[in-house]
């Protein structure tokens, strides 16, 4: 029977930690609840992850909000709940952060104000949701919804990153193989061809020239990307260049489709979560606009904000922008007509989460053979250029 590590709060408010044997995680939770405890974390003992506020801030925020929601639902006062979470924190940065929140709350500040004072951890989106929840008296419900949002966003981000691991390894192996060929293998043949009394074939001379350049100026090839990345980051801070770059990115085959679907999912889920949590529509749209990383799509949201400010709907300006997929305007229009805009936005986000994963699979299905065939053609071309020269030497010897 597996063992599970747990953290719970007893009926008297005491923080409990320990291990128990149970058939499953659900059985361990039921056992703790049967003892009158409030379970916060129940995880299998092997490979249990710790909080790491500094290194994995979003994941920790999700855990913090979910734990706080659990305690508030159980009737624990906010200050006592923060104190319990501070006792449960397993590293000093997390403990200091919670201690600061606790001091501010006990000093009379609202939780949203205390979070807003720490922008390095809590973003504008999270602060706005908590502020609306405190005004509406539904803090525990909104905190749970916020934790769900952060975890879903993190899951989407992790799936994109995981999908890029194999292509990145393939590109690295390709570049390393070419580097070995050009720096170590080709120069060995150069000494062999030096005494030949005839001109080498053109492909061989090209390969020899490239190998010589890489050997003599390889440091420059390494320095250029290191210089180009800071330059590109600085250039992207400019509005005009950023807009051209984002427009070019959206126009790329396959990759542009993937970027659009990711941004659409972020737009729909963020706006739906904010509206359902009681954040006013205009404030929610401004937060969504700042959440989008593509400036072209952010400009489209600006037009939606102008329409909403004048009392208009969302579907018409989204459709008129021709930036978002047609399904977005259609479903938002349905949500506005039915009075269930928040639910329709969340459903739209789930649709584009699935579409994003499909787009990633399609992109990888094309990218992997292109990289493999490209590597084979380049390496094969290099080998053939050397073989042609060697065969020419043999003919000369006869």
Image: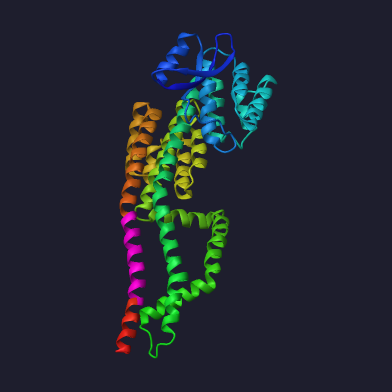
Q: Position of residue 262 (x, y in %)?
A: 41, 43
- Majority secondary structure of magenta residues: helix
Q: Is residue 217 magenta?
A: no
Q: Residue at x 42, y 77 (%)?
A: 189
Task: Single out the residue that lies furthest toward the right.
Answer: 107
**Residue 126 figure quarter:** top right
Q: Quadrant of the N terminus?
A: top left
Q: Nearer the viewer, residue 335 or 27?
A: 27
**Residue 334 figure quarter:** top left
Q: Is residue 321 visible?
A: no
Say whether residue 209 is left or right of residue 219: left
Q: Position of residue 230 (x, y in %)?
A: 57, 57
Say whether residue 53 is left or right of residue 327: right
Q: Position of residue 342 (x, y in %)?
A: 41, 29
Q: Quadrant of the C terminus?
A: bottom left
Q: Nearer the viewer, residue 143 or 246?
A: 143
Task: Single out the residue that lies furthest toward the front.
Answer: 398
Q: Position of residue 220 (x, y in %)?
A: 55, 68
Q: Is residue 396 visible?
A: yes
Task: Single out the residue that lies furthest toward the bottom.
Answer: 197
Q: Nearer the viewer, residue 80 or 373?
A: 373
Q: Residue at x 34, y 80 (%)?
A: 390
Above or below: residue 375 compared with residue 191 = above
Q: Is residue 384 magenta?
A: yes
Say whether residue 287 is left or right of residue 197: right
Q: Residue at x 38, y 18 (%)?
A: 23
Segment colored magenta: 367-386
Above or below: residue 109 compared with residue 281 = above
């Amino acid at each position: 029977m597996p063992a599970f590590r747990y953290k719970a709060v007893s009926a008297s408010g005491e923080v409990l930690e320990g291990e128990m044997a149970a058939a499953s995680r659900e059985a361990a939770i039921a056992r703790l609840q049967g003892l009158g405890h409030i379970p916060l974390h129940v995880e299998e003992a092997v490979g249990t992850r710790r909080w790491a506020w500094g290194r994995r801030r979003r994941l920790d925020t999700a855990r913090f909000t979910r734990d706080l929601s659990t305690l508030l639902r159980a009737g624990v006062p906010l200050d006592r709940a923060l104190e319990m979470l501070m006792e449960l924190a397993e590293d000093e940065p997390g403990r200091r952060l919670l201690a600061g929140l606790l001091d501010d709350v006990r000093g009379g500040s609202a939780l949203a104000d205390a979070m807003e004072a720490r922008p390095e951890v809590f973003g504008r989106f999270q602060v706005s949701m908590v502020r609306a929840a405190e005004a509406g008296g539904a803090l525990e419900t909104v905190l749970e919804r916020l934790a769900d949002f952060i975890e879903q966003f993190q899951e989407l981000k992790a799936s994109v990153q995981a999908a890029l691991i194999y292509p990145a390894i393939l590109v690295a192996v390709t570049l390393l193989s070419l580097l070995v060929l050009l720096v170590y293998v080709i120069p060995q043949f150069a000494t062999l061809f030096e005494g030949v009394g005839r001109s080498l074939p053109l492909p061989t001379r090209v390969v020899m020239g490239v190998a010589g350049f890489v050997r003599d100026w390889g440091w420059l090839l390494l320095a250029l990307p290191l210089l180009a990345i800071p330059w590109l980051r600085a250039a992207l801070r400019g509005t005009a260049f950023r807009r051209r770059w984002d427009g070019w990115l959206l126009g790329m085959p396959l990759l542009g489709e993937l970027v659009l679907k990711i941004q659409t999912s972020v737009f729909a889920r963020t706006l739906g979560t904010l509206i359902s949590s009681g954040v006013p529509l205009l404030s929610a749209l401004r937060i969504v606009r700042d959440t989008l990383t593509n400036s072209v799509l952010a400009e489209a949201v600006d037009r939606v904000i102008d329409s909403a400010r004048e009392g208009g709907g969302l579907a018409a300006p989204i459709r008129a922008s021709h930036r978002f997929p047609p399904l977005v305007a259609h479903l938002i229009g349905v949500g506005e007509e039915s009075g269930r805009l928040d639910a329709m936005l969340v459903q739209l986000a789930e649709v584009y989460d699935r579409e994003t994963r499909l787009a990633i699979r399609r992109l990888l299905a094309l990218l992997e053979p292109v990289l493999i065939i490209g590597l084979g053609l380049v390496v094969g071309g290099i080998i053939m250029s050397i073989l042609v020269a060697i065969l020419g030497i043999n003919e000369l010897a006869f």
